[in-house]
Image (cartoon, rainbow, N blue to C red):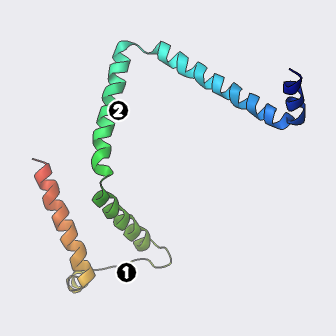
Amino acid sequence: MEELQEAIAQNPEAVAGFIERLDLTNQLLDVVSLGTRAMDDEMVVNLVGMVGRLGELLEPASHENTIAGLDKLLNAVAEASDPDNPPDKVGLMGLMKAVNDPDVQKALGFVIKLAKTLGKKLD
């Protein structure tokens, strides 16, 4: 017992931090306990269903091709949205001229492939 008292006396900040974490843990457990007591069977079934649907949604979202494609898309949006270098206004002639640009052709190919693939998924 004396060893414990001595350890506490030598490390008051550590003991105080431990007590704070223990208190927070007890508060979180109380909240979880209240939540679980308040849930009825229908709520549990609905929650399990939502978690299942969320898992189904996250599966394709976590595919490496999806991540790589979204990364490219978001970087392109960020670059095209740069207020210091705004996009030019483009009319019909500018559009016709832009179609000859290899970068535009690659992007159009991607958009067309995306549209075709999405169209198949919509059936």
* Element assignment for label 1: loop
Q: Looking at the image, is 63 positioned above or below residue 95?
A: above
* Element assignment for label 2: helix
Name the residue at 90% across, 31% down: 9
Task: Provide residue 72's location: percent of width, then percent of height.
Answer: 35, 67
Name the residue at 22% across, 85% down: 93
Closest to the observer, 122 or 31 = 31
Instruction: Please identify the quarter of the rendering in which residue 117 is found.
Output: bottom left
Query: Where does label 1 land, which residue?
Result: 88
Q: Amino acid at mark 2?
A: Val
Task: Provide residue 68's location: percent of width, then percent of height.
Answer: 33, 63
- Observer-side mark, 2 or 1, equals 2
Tell me if 93 is positioned left or right of 72 in this view.
left
Tell me the quarter of the image containing the N terminus: top right
Closest to the observer, 7 or 70 = 7
Query: Where does label 2 land, which residue?
Result: 51
Name the residue at 16% across, 65% down: 113
Q: Amino acid at mark 1?
A: Asp
Q: CA distance from mark 2 to mark 1?
A: 45 Å
